[in-house]
Image (cartoon, rainbow, N blue to C red):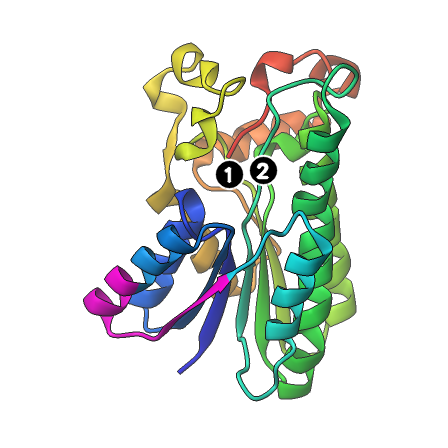
Amino acid sequence: MATALVTGASAGLGEEFAWQLATAGHDLVVVARTRDRLSELAEVVTSATGVAVEVLVADLATPEGRETVAARLADDARPISLLVNNAGFATGRGFVFGEWEEEAAMIDVLITAPARLTHGALPGMIERGHGAILNVSSIAAHLGDSTYAAHKRWVLEFTNALVGELRGTGVTATAVLPGLTRTEFHDKPGLDHYRREFPDAVWLSAEQVVSAALTGVRRGSVTVTPSVRYATAGALARITPKALTRRMGSMGPRR
C-alpha cells in the first residue's frame, strides 16, 4: 500500500489531505508541531479507514525539524510515494515594520522546508521509478502585494523547475494554487478581517481544494487552480501589470 507524507496535517488543508488520502487507501505519515492533535487525528483516521497512520512531530521552522522529516522521507525501508508540502502560515503584517523573526520563520516554512523535504524524497522516488511531489502554493503567487505572495510564487516556480528535472523519471511535481479557503488559516489576528471583507461566494472549502489537488496529481498536472472563478482570476492576474497588483494589499494572503 502506498504511503503519503503530509506536512501541516493537524488542521485545515493538511487534515483534509490526510482524510482524503486515507479514504483512497493510502497509509500516512502526518507531520506537525503538536503531538496531541496529530495523535487524535491518527486515531480517528485509522479507526474510520483502517489505514496505518504514523505520527511525526517536527517544527519545520527549525533545522532540526526539517532534518527529522527529510530523514523519514529518505528511508528506503519505508518508502514514501507522495510528499504533500502543505505546512504554511502568514504573519498578517507587512515586511518593513514586521518582526524579522516571524518573517524568517515564514521563509523557513514556506521555502526552505519544501526545498529540503523534496530534496530528501526525490532520490528514492526516482530510483523506484514512481512518486509525486505536491506543493501547496496560492493564487497570491500571481500578485506582487506581499512577501507571502513572493514566497508562494517561489513555490510555484520551484515546482516548474522540478518538472523539467524530473522528465522521464516517472516522478511528477504539481503545485496547487488555492484562493480564499475556509480553514483555521484566517483565524489568526491580522488575517481574520478577510472573513468579514469577502462574501461567502468567493470562499472555497477545504474539500474542494484537496479534491482538485489530488485529481491533478493523478493526472500529472503541473499546476491546479481549484474553481473556474480562481482560474480565471489567476489568468487575469498573470497579465495584469505588477504596478497594479502591488496595490492590491487588501487581497493579501490566501489559503
Indicate the position of residue 223 as horizontal and vertical percent values: 59, 50
Task: Say whether residue 232 is visible.
Answer: yes
Which numbered disc covers residue 138?
2
Residue 121 position in % (x across, y down): 65, 72
| Residue 49 sits inside the magenta stretch | yes
Q: CA distance from mark 2 to mark 1?
A: 5 Å
Crowd rating for badge 1 (residues with CA inside 10 Å; few <14, some 14–19, many 20+): many
Q: Which of the 4 quarters of the picture holds residue 173?
A: bottom right
Q: Residue at x 51, y 20 (%)?
A: 191
Q: Amino acid at mark 2?
A: Ser
Is 18 drawn above or below residue 11 in the view shown?
below
Image location of residue 134, percent across then percent down? 57, 58
- Of callouts 2 and 1, which one flags the residue occurring earlier in the amino acid sequence? 2
Q: Residue at x 70, y 11 (%)?
A: 247
The stretch in magenta equals 43-56
Of the residues shown, which amino acid type is indicated by label 1?
A: Pro
Residue with the mark numbered 1: 178
Left or right: 40 in relation to 127: left
Q: Is residue 193 above or below residue 35?
A: above
Front residue (pair 3, 213): 3
The quadrant in which residue 137 appears is: top right
Under tag 1, what secondary structure? loop
148 relative position to 42: left or right: right
Magenta region includes residue 246:
no
